[in-house]
Image: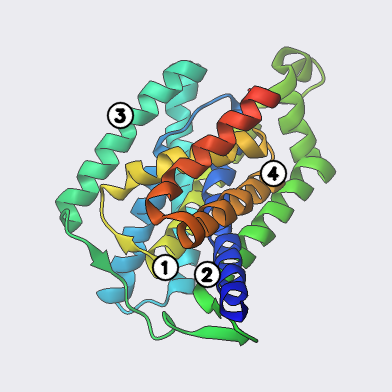
């Protein structure tokens, strides 16, 4: 019984920490979709591009991961602005953005495969196996760091959206752009800032993906479904909701793998999503 309880607790902790990665990835997608009305599929490809850049900087040039994050975040902020300028220039709408960013995803995936090949890569670091022991529970330091980063970013995003003039301008423009413009809000200008920040969060998520997981270009598609479900369950435009939904899906998947069967884990996110949509549509 003691071993069973320990396994249950370990699985729950692992799921909560996995939810941090899910929430970190879903945050940018949720904000882009909810406030900019753009379904940015390239968000996942950008995250993996950030992961590969972290791998390259670490293995070839010896750059520590935290310095890689400081380099990648502003770079991806600029990439997000550049991509958003295309949306603005050609007046891309919600459904069209899904198709356009799918094409961008394919281009980035092909670029990754061309530069780093399709082989599986692993970024080995001295602290990869470091854990903190809490009684019978072992907490991986890297996973805990990713969760803490997700929590800080989600809290900062919530505060910015609800307590600052920029956040209020973003929400007003998302609700009714013409009325917001009548009150002097430049909705296009603030949308560039949000698009850049969303891409920067993708880059930061990529740093942790490189540290925690194994890299392969084909994994981009594997993350899309789960993170989409997390973004919808958490509520579009809600960074705290994205983190909470990520924890919910992470724990459900982890417990399913340990108690039922690992093969059932991929079904969990969509099962939860279907139940929630049936009870209360969120989009």
Number of other residues with Cα within 10 Å of mark 1, as a class: few under 14, some 14 to 19, many 20 or more: many
- Looking at the image, which residue is at 82% across and 20% down? 183
Q: Nearer the viewer, residue 26 or 62?
A: 26
Q: Quadrant of residue 166?
A: top right
Circle 2: element type: helix
Can you say which quadrant of the picture contains the C terminus?
Answer: top right
| Label ID, residue 62 | none
Q: Which residue is tagged 1? A: 212
**Colour scheme in use:** rainbow
Circle 1: element type: helix
**Alpha carbon of mark 3 to alpha carbon of mark 4: how far?**
28 Å
Q: Earlier in the sequence, mark 1 or mark 4?
A: 1
Does 241 sit above or below residue 247?
A: above
Can you say which quadrant of the picture contains the N terminus?
Answer: bottom right
Kindly tell me whether residue 92 is visible in this rendering: no
Number of other residues with Cα within 10 Å of mark 4, as a class: few under 14, some 14 to 19, many 20 or more: many
Circle 3: element type: helix
Q: Which residue is tagged 3? A: 103
Does 203 sit above or below residue 87?
A: below
- Looking at the image, which residue is at 59% across and 45% down? 27
Q: Which residue is tagged 2? A: 143
> In the rendered structure, are the residues bearing label 3 and label 2 in contact, judged by CB atoms less than 8 Å apart?
no
> In the rendered structure, are the residues bearing label 2 and label 1 in contact, judged by CB atoms less than 8 Å apart?
yes
Q: Nearer the viewer, residue 74 or 145?
A: 145
> In the rendered structure, are the residues bearing label 1 and label 4 in contact, judged by CB atoms less than 8 Å apart?
no
> In the rendered structure, are the residues bearing label 4 and label 2 in contact, judged by CB atoms less than 8 Å apart?
no
Q: Earlier in the sequence, mark 1 or mark 3?
A: 3
Q: Nearer the viewer, residue 278 or 66?
A: 278
């Amino acid at each position: 019984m003691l071993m069973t309880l320990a396994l249950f607790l370990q699985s729950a902790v692992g799921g909560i920490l996995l939810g941090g990665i899910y929430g970190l990835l879903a945050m940018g997608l949720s904000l882009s979709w909810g406030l900019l009305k753009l379904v940015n599929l390239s968000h996942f490809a950008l995250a993996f591009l950030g992961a590969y850049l972290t791998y390259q900087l670490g293995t070839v040039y010896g750059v520590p991961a935290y310095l890689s994050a400081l380099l990648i975040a502003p770079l991806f902020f600029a990439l997000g602005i550049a991509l958003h300028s295309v949306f603005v220039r050609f007046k891309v709408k919600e459904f069209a953005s899904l198709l356009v960013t799918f094409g961008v995803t394919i281009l980035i995936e092909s670029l990754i495969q061309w530069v780093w090949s399709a082989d599986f890569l692993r970024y080995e670091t001295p602290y990869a196996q470091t854990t903190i022991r809490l009684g019978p529970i072992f907490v991986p330091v890297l996973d805990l760091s990713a969760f803490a980063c997700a929590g800080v970013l989600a809290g900062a995003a919530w505060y910015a959206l609800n307590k600052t003039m920029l956040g209020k301008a973003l929400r007003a423009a998302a609700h009714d752009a013409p009325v917001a413009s009548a009150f002097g809000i430049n909705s296009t200008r603030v949308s560039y800032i949000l698009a850049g920040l969303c891409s920067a969060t993708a880059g930061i998520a990529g740093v942790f993906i490189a540290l925690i997981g194994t890299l392969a270009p084909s994994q981009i598609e594997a993350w899309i479904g789960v993170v989409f479900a997390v973004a919808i369950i958490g509520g579009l435009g809600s960074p705290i909701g994205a983190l909470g939904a990520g924890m919910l899906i992470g724990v459900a998947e982890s417990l399913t793998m340990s108690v039922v069967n690992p093969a059932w884990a991929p079904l969990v996110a969509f099962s939860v999503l279907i139940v929630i949509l049936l009870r209360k549509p969120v989009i």
